[in-house]
Image (tube, helix red, strand yellow):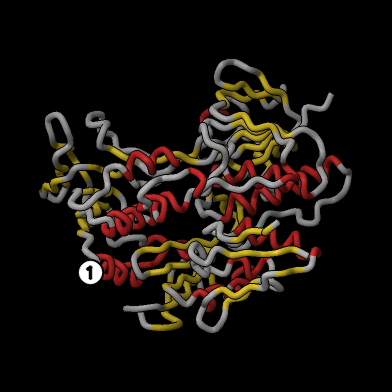
Amino acid sequence: MIKVNVDMNKCQHYGQCVFEAPNIFKLNEDDKLEYVATADDSELGNIEAAIDVCPMQAIFIVD
Amino acid sequence: MSEGVVVVGASMGGLRLAESLRRFGYTGPVRIFGNEGHPPYNRPPLSKDLLSAAEIDFAEVAFPQRSATADVEWNLSAEAVTADLSNQHITISGGEQVSFEHLIIATGLRSKRLGFESFPGERHALRSFEDAKALRSKLGVGSKIVIVGSGFIACEVAATATKLGCEVHIVSPSKSPMDRALGEKLSAVVKLRLEAQGITFHMQATVIELIGSNRLEAVALSDGSTVRCDSLVEAIGSEANCEWLAGNDLDITDGLLCDGSLRAVRASGGSWPNVFGVGDVARFPNPIFDATPRRIEHWNIPTESAKFVGQQIAASYNSIEATVEVFRPLPSFWSDQFDMHIFGLGMSYLADESKLVHGDISGDCVFEFTREGVLVGVVGIGHRSVVQNYRSALER
């Protein structure tokens, strides 16, 4: 399993990650980011892509 | 003997290219050369959070590096000075010759500067970490700052400096700030919102003289006025770092001209099969919009172009077909200024018409941009989900 962490002090809720890893990230009705903190290993590529496109570089995989 | 992949440019594009090569199965050597002394870092905070931090810490902006690219060779403070594409080598400052099988040109941009020769100490630009550090030391309560230019970086620096207590003036030949991306109607309203926060605009004006004896004291403007200042920030745009490629049968008039697969176009016809442009140095046609090659200075382009090129190269080494043959990225951009969160998709600046489709123009709102009736861009203040939902309509 992969543990995902988003630094919510950095996150500006742009939602770029949503398109790279839609199973992990979403913008709620208030335009705020929500995410699942544990993901299946098969999501690794998507999560890494989400990390890459985050303008605030706020997404991390926790070891 | 395989010389593998050589990347010139050790910033975000170079890093993402190395990651992409490894992800798509290229296992050979990757050597990266960059003129800055720092490993790759994220530039957007330079005009925002980092510029207002009490202590500027490089760790805040450094990109984390992955184990998959641990064997990549990084050569920092190593500027490429010439290239010989026919003989497949480049020359690094100091004279070292480096051979390549594939060459990636990711040398990015540098800030354009005003022509004045004098007053070097109080004149700033904002492109690198070192630029941000130098400018940060000049921003404090009561400092008088003149910013030349009214694009995104100019307005972000203006917002940050205002929040730090500076007196901020923007001087620009444009009619209203960020008008190229926001369109005439929205930028006119944004100007009012920035003025309400305390920024003074001198629009449709240019700086004609720097005034002062030992230090900068004021700038004289083309409209006849004089603005007192302690520091000058030149945010008048960027130019591509591609002079070092001269003499190689390339078109480097405004960035490196590339074809639809990001291969460098030969001026005499065809393309170099093993030379690619990545990031904002590359001028390429984007079939989402039209056949005109353009440089795109948005943050998502280095990452997307690096992924695309890395896959092409890895596929060629493994004798397989790449899954995507033509590069067609959807540009995206954002900017945070005071309470305004600007977010755009596409190329609003190609539009001949814009229309408010959501919200209220004086507050959070979304504009559609069309060219000859076809949607080419969407820009919102707030309402990020609404903007994001245009993605598939724009990608077509």
Residue B224: image location, x then y, percent: 10, 48
Residue visible at 31% across and 40% down in the picture: B124
Q: Residue furthest front?
A: A63
Mark 1 falls on what kind of element? helix
Residue B379 in sight: yes
Number of numbered discs overlaid on the protein picture:
1
Q: Position of residue B210 (x, y in %)?
A: 18, 37
Left or right placement of residue A30 versus residue B148 in this view: right
Image location (x, y in percent) of residue B105: 62, 37
Where is residue B88, by image quadrant?
A: top right
Dot 1: within a 10 Å radius of its alpha carbon, few (fewer than 14), some, or many (20 or more) residues? Answer: few
What amino acid is labelled 1 in the image?
A: Ala
Res B239 quadrant in image: top left
Question: Which quadrant of the structure image shows residue B287?
Answer: bottom right
Chain at tag 1? B
Could you tell me if residue B168 is visible in this image?
Answer: no
- At a point 81% along the width and 42% down the height, the residue shown is B26
- Furthest residue in direction right, as rendered: B319
Q: Quadrant of the C terminus of chain A?
A: bottom right
Q: Which residue is mark 1?
A: B196
Which residue appears farthest toward the top when viewing the image? B95
Judged left or right of residue B12, residue B168 is left
The x and y percentages for residue A41 are: 80, 63
In this picture, is B4 found above or below B340? above
Residue located 17% across and 36% down the image = B216
Task: Decide: is A47 above or below B388.
Answer: above
Along the line of sight, the residue nearer the viewer: B320 or B253: B320
- Residue drawn 64% across the image and 32% down it: B74
Task: Give the quarter of the figure containing the N terminus of chain A.
Answer: bottom right
